[in-house]
Amino acid sequence: MAVKVLILEDNPVARSFLCRVVRESFSDAIQITEAGDLESARRQILLTGGSQGLHGVDPFKLVLVDLELPDGNGMELLAELAHYPATKIVTTLYSDDDHLFPALQCGADGYLLKEDRFEVLVEELQKIVRGQPPLSPAIARRLLTHFRQGAGSDSQAPDSGFMTATGFTTSKPVPIEKPLDHERLTPRESEVLTYLSKGFTIKEIASLMGIKWFTVNDHIKSIYKKLNVSSRAEAAVLASKQGLV
C-alpha cells in the first residue's frame, strides 16, 4: 500500500517542487494529494478519518504545511491535527522566531525552508527514516542558539516542548528515574522499543519487522506518549532499568 502524503501549498510552482522533493526522498510507493488552501486540505483530511484519524481509515502519514495561505494560516491546521497520526512538517519561507516557535508549539514535527536547495530538502526529509528531526540547517542553528542563550534564564523560550518520534525536544528532559509503565505497551511497541534500545534506525526496524517505516514511526510516537519520554535515549535507559531489553 502506498504511503499517503498531503501537501498544503497555495503556490502551484512551489507545490510541484515539493512533490518532486517528496518522491525523491522515499523509496516507498507514494500517493500525493495536493491542496491549495486550508479548506481543501480539511476536506481531504475529513476523508481520512478527520482530525483524529479514526481507526480503520487509511490516514495521511506525512503532511507538509505552508503557513501563509489564501484562507488563513497553516498553524490553524497544525493545531487541529494535534492528535492526527501523521508526521507534520512546516514548509515555508519564514525563518524568524515569530513563525518558528508558534509552529512548533502548534504541533509541527519539523520545519523546512522552501528556499533550500532540492538536495538539501531531500536529505532533511530522509532524516525521518533515520530517526532524526527534519529541520533546515538554518532552523537547527537558530534553535540551538536560542535555547543555549535562554538556558537558566527567563528567556522567550516556549513553554511547551517540540517533541517528535525522532526524539528531538526543546523542553526539559523527563528525569530518568520516572517509573516505566511498560505494561501499557502493546507487543509490537515492546518489540520496537527493544530494537530502539539496541540502536537500530527506524528504517532498519521496519526491515526487521516487515512493516513500513511510517508504521514504526507511529509505534515510536505511541511509546514516547505512554512512557512520557521525549527521546530514544530516555526510552532505552528506562527500558534497560526495568530489564525489558
Image (cartoon, rainbow, N blue to C red):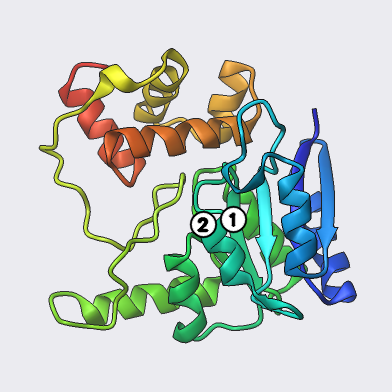
Q: Is residue 179 above or below residue 169?
A: above
* Quadrant position of the C terminus in the picture: top left
**Is 54 in front, or is 28?**
54
Q: Is residue 36 left or right of residue 217?
A: right
Q: Is residue 2 above or below residue 70?
A: above
**Is 205 in front, or is 64?**
64
- Residues marked 1 and 2 touching at CB (< 8 Å): yes
Please provide percent x and percent y for residue 8.
75, 64
Q: Residue at x 28, y 32 (%)?
A: 236
Please provide percent x and percent y for residue 105.
42, 67
Quadrant in the rendering for residue 204: top right
The total number of labels drawn is: 2
Residue 112 visible at all: no
C-alpha span from label 1 to label 2: 5 Å
Q: Residue at x 62, y 40 (%)?
A: 53
Q: Residues within 10 Å of mark 2 (few under 14, many from 20)?
A: many
Q: Residue at x 32, y 47 (%)?
A: 230
Please provide percent x and percent y for residue 206.
59, 26
Residue 7 visible at all: yes
Residue marked by disc 2: 109
Q: Is residue 235 above or below residue 108?
A: above
Residue marked by disc 1: 88
Q: Secondary structure at mark 1?
A: strand
**Is 115 in front, or is 50?**
50
